[in-house]
Image: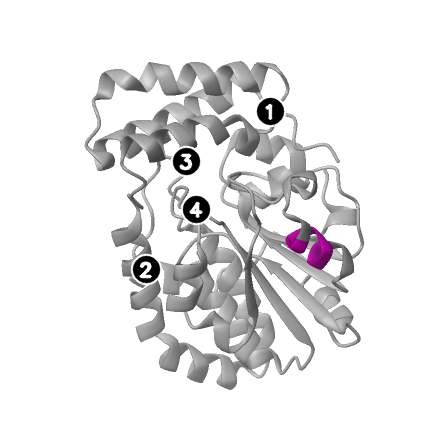
Amino acid sequence: MPGLRSDPVRCGLCFRRGFQGFLQRAGLPPESLDGYLDSIVARLREGASPPEAGVEAWKTLREATGHKDIFHGEKTFFTRELLARLPALRKALAASGEPAMGALAAATWCNLVDSAQGNAIPTPERLLEIFGTPLTRDGRRQFLKTLESASSLLILGDNAGETVMDRLFLEVSGYSGRVFYMVRPLPVMNDATREDALEAGLHRYAVILDSGSDVPSVIPSMLSQEALEVFRSSDLILAKGQGNLEGLWGVRDPRVYHSFVVKCPVVAEAVGLPEGSGVFVSSTGLEA
């Protein structure tokens, strides 16, 4: 299953922006940046997708930090700030008459809480303003219609914070089937781990399982046996964020829907939409 075709130059620049901030946050010498980037760019030139290309660099970074979660503070901040806003969000969604639709949109826009691009992340207050912005490509109704007859739903999680909006969707959707929520097994960027999913309260609505892979993405061939079995057997799959999009690019499976914000020119060209677009679409209708 091929991943998104990467661009060594543009993807390399994106990694440079991100890793500059990561090294500063971790208190590591800035001169070590080139060492991380050399391994990443080499993998990109071999045709690896961006999540695959960064695997070894992330392992090295974890070792250099003593396996600390260098984004723990940021993840906790966004999770708790959005949890505090749940009562107001529930009330607003109930008043809208279409709470599941609104929750899916909020969870899509919450994909902006992303440390990978090295760009500024919106404040919680700004996120709430963005939640009402129309999606550029919108397959939410089709997804909800399919969900009605699905016995099981697998959500492929992305960042901590977005987890809270995924929980809100599960709360208001009324879905009674079995739900699985897949997280990263180890800290990578501000992606959600089991600890982050528990902090968001997702364990009340879903079975939490990790992918078994260091990749900041879900790539079926790299999943653990348990995770792969759940992926294969789930009736409906919701893949959150650009990382999971990149790992699943080329998978044309009617069970799979993508929810993400376009945040780089490579993805913008691939899907035929401008950067900043909010997207909720079936994998069968993904490409431009």
- Magenta stretch in the rendered image: 226-231
Amino acid carrying label 4: it is Leu
Q: Position of residue 70 (x, y in %)?
A: 28, 43
Task: Give coordinates of residue 209: x percent, y percent.
Answer: 56, 60
Tell me the distance, in whole angstroms, between the alpha carbons under discs 1 and 2. Answer: 30 Å
Q: Is residue 130 visible?
A: no
Circle 4 SS class: loop
Query: Is 253 rendered above or below residue 221?
Result: below
Q: Dot 1: within a 10 Å radius of its alpha carbon, few (fewer than 14), some, or many (20 or more) residues? A: many
Residue shown at the point (65%, 62%) measured from the top left: 154
- The crowding category of the residue bearing disc 4, from other C-alpha atoms within 10 Å (few below 14, some 14 to 19, many at least 20), is many
- The relative height of residue 218 versus residue 174 in the rendered view (above or below) is above
The numbered dot on residue 42 is none
Q: Earlier in the sequence, mark 1 or mark 4?
A: 1
Q: CA distance from mark 3 to mark 2?
A: 17 Å
Q: Is residue 32 above or below residue 77?
A: above
Residue at image mark 3: 117
Instruction: In this rendered view, identify the residue nearer to me: 253 or 97.
Output: 253
Prevalent SS, magenta region: helix
Amino acid type at circle 2 is Phe
What residue does disc 4 label? 186
Residue type at numbered disc 1:
Ser
For marks 1 and 4, give the CA distance.
Answer: 24 Å
Say which mark, if any, is on residue 78.
2
Labelled pair 3, 2 in contact (Cβ < 8 Å)? no
